[in-house]
Amino acid sequence: MSDVPGIVVTGASGRMGQMLIRTVMESDRAKLVGVVEREGHDWIGQDIGTAMGGAPLDVTVSDDPLEVIAKAHAVIDFTAPAATVEFAGLAAQARCVHVIGTTGMTDEDLAKLKPAARHATIIRAGNMSLGVNLLVQLTKQVAAALDEDFDIEVIEAHHNQKVDAPSGTALMLGEAAAEGRGVSLDAVSDRGRDGMTGKRERGHIGFHAIRGGDIVGEHDVLFAAAGERITLRHVASDRAVFARGALKAALWGQGRKPGEYDMLDVLGLRKD
């Protein structure tokens, strides 16, 4: 295991953080060299295996990301926008791959990643699963093939603890549909209908967010015209699909030139 990439997982106590830790530990292609939690968290100073309710893993939970990231080949980061921006700078200093699954990032947040990408490999995606990224490509192709007689609606469902809406995946799908149509999503995005909104605008792309229970992730792209409908759908029933995709990205990024990439690059699906 000494010659495989060392991985740091941020947000260690979260659901995705714990899933990522288990995924790295189960892999024979990577090793866990550090985990990070926010300052003051109860897990700080504990062995991560013990903190997660299992056997010790000889990795201590730290609140010093600079020290931990300095010894890593890759950082896998599903946290919050402000934290992700900070981790990007530290990953750039360490010249290690930064895999970002954080959602809810604004244009301002994304702009702050660009200086880091001049020195390190950043792989960012609203969803790390193979199936979703295939769905993104299909959405783009179908949107390009159908004219504005087909209304496009993106419907997503997640667990009741998710804090951002629409989901990062829904926005990926909306961007794909807009790109297929040759328009800017900002110009045609239609969200949060309520009350007397008037009739639907031709050519707009609608978004709808459902929150409930422990739903891992469900995404539908509906193309609806007079007399017919087409629905493209992806359902995730296990967060492990995202963790496996993130680890795949971390391994793919080893030796890549600095810059910004996404899962289409990792999966060889890009058709630029």
Image (cartoon, helix red, strand yellow):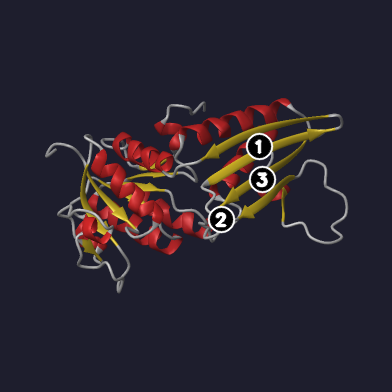
What amino acid type should be assigned to the residue bearing mark 3? Ile
Q: Earlier in the sequence, mark 3 or mark 1?
A: 3
Is residue 116 shown above or below 182? below
According to the picture, the residue beneath numbered tag 3 turns out to be 155
Mark 1 to mark 2 CA distance (whole Å): 29 Å
Q: Quadrant of residue 107?
A: bottom right
In percent of width and height, residue 75 lies at 30, 50
Q: Earlier in the sequence, mark 1 or mark 2?
A: 1
According to the picture, the residue beneath numbered tag 1 turns out to be 177
- Describe residue 93's horizontal placement relative to residue 272 as left or right: left
Residue furthest left in the image:
2
For the point 46% across and 44% down, the residue is: 125
For the point 38% across and 58% down, the residue is: 14
According to the picture, the residue beneath numbered tag 2 turns out to be 213
For the point 52% across and 57% down, the residue is: 104
What amino acid type should be assigned to the residue bearing mark 2? Gly
Residue furthest bottom in the image:
40
Mark 3 to mark 2 CA distance (whole Å): 17 Å
Is residue 135 shown above or below 119? above
How busy is the neighbourhood of tag 2: few (under 14 within 10 Å), some, or many (20 plus)?
few
Mark 3 to mark 1 CA distance (whole Å): 13 Å
Is residue 94 shown above or below 220? below
